[in-house]
Each structure stands twice: as structure tokens, then as C-alpha cells.
Image: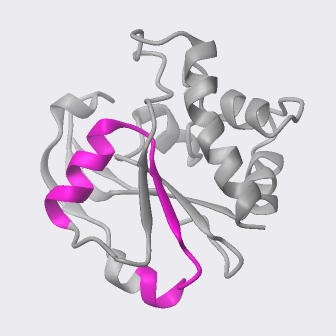
Amino acid sequence: MQKFALPLLIDQTSKILILGTIPGDQSIAKQQYYGNNGNHFWKIVFTIFGENYNSNYEEKKQLLKTHGIALWNVLASCIREGSSDSKIKNETVNDFENLHIQYPNIRHIFFESKTAAKFYQKYVKPNNKVKYHILPSTSGLNARMTFEQKIESWKELAATAQSEI
């Protein structure tokens, strides 16, 4: 089944871009990044920034904006049955060349999984003005790490956001 990325969440103050691979079925249905309740993304982000978790999507987006963080996907579209990145075929990549022209303040890209980084490295020429970071997947399917271990790894994002203010 054909899957499409969600719209880019960004503004001119964004200095950090978090990239997932492509949204899962629940996120696509809700039209919300990390919309699957089994995904720990939002709980991790609220925790690393010392905020109480809020399930309101507008509040979630505001938290990222406050810290200069944008969200997008590496892939613009793909064929995939279900939500597993391992089943991706016939992928097309988003236009990162134009992204960097339109949003020159992006200085850090954090990949939300090794798979997102793999697709980016396969299709996108690195930008020498950007530092790249790979974080562990926040997916509930990533059982190799506990929630607490994911939080520890994701603290790099909070430290980077603080240093970019």
C-alpha cells in the first residue's frame, strides 16, 4: 500500500530537524507525527525537556517549536504493508536540498532511527553545515532498550537544543 509523509513541521527559528523514516499507519490516519500510543517519542521529548506530558497535539508541536525543533520524514513516499520500516519498497526521498535553502538555520539533524539514517545516507548528499546524530528508535517495537535507556540517549537532543538557543 502506498504511504506518504506528513507535512513538514518547521519555521524560520528551527535549528534542529528530527527525521523519522515515514509515518506508521496510525500516524497517517491521525495526521499526527508519532500518533501511535505505543511509540515513546512524545513522552521522551517531554521528559528530556523537563515538561509534564500533554496529549494535546498542538501542545506537543508547541513544545518542539519552543526548543527550535522541526519534524519531518526522510521518505516522501513508499510502498509498505503495515507500519514496519523493514517492509519499505519503492521509496522516494523528500527534497532536502530545497529544505536547506528555505531553512538555512537547520544546523543539526537527528535521525529517529538507524533506518531513517540509512535511507537518508542512501539518497541525500550530506550538507557540510549540518551535524548529524543517530538516536535509538522511539518505537515500542524497539525492545532492545528500555524506556529509561532511550531517555538517556535522547538527552543529547535536549543538550543540543540548549546550546543552540
Task: Look at the image and give the residue range highlighted in magenta.
Answer: 99-123
Q: Residue at x 19, y 62 (%)?
A: 92
Whether residue 35 appears in this view of the structure is: no
Residue 118 sits above or below residue 140 on the image: below
55 and 143: which is toward the camera: 143
Q: Where does residue 55 sit, x and y in percent of width and height?
A: 79, 33
Residue at the bottom extreme? 101
Question: Which residue corresponds to the image point at 81% horizontal and 56% vertical from the top-left?
Answer: 62
The N terminus lies in which quarter of the figure?
top left
Q: Nearer the viewer, residue 25 or 8?
A: 8
Visual colour scheme: one colour
Image point (40%, 15%), residue name: 141
Q: Left or right: 125 with respect to 9?
A: left
> Residue lying farthest right?
52
Question: Which residue of the protein is positioned furthest toward the left in this rendering?
Answer: 90
Q: Which residue is located at x 70 percent, y 45 percent?
A: 158
Asked if residue 88 lies in the magenta stretch, the reply is: no
Residue 125 placement (x, y as % from top left): 22, 73
* Residue 106 part of the magenta-drawn span: yes
Q: Is residue 109 visible?
A: yes
Query: Does 164 sit left or right of 73 as displayed?
Result: right
Residue 127, given in percent of the width and then of the height, sits at 34, 76
Q: Quadrant of residue 34?
A: top right
For residue 3, above or below residue 34 = below
Q: Quadrant of the C terminus?
A: bottom right
Q: Is residue 66 left or right of residue 35?
A: right
Determine whether, in the image, residue 121 is placed left or right of residue 138.
left
Q: Position of residue 112 (x, y in %)?
A: 45, 41
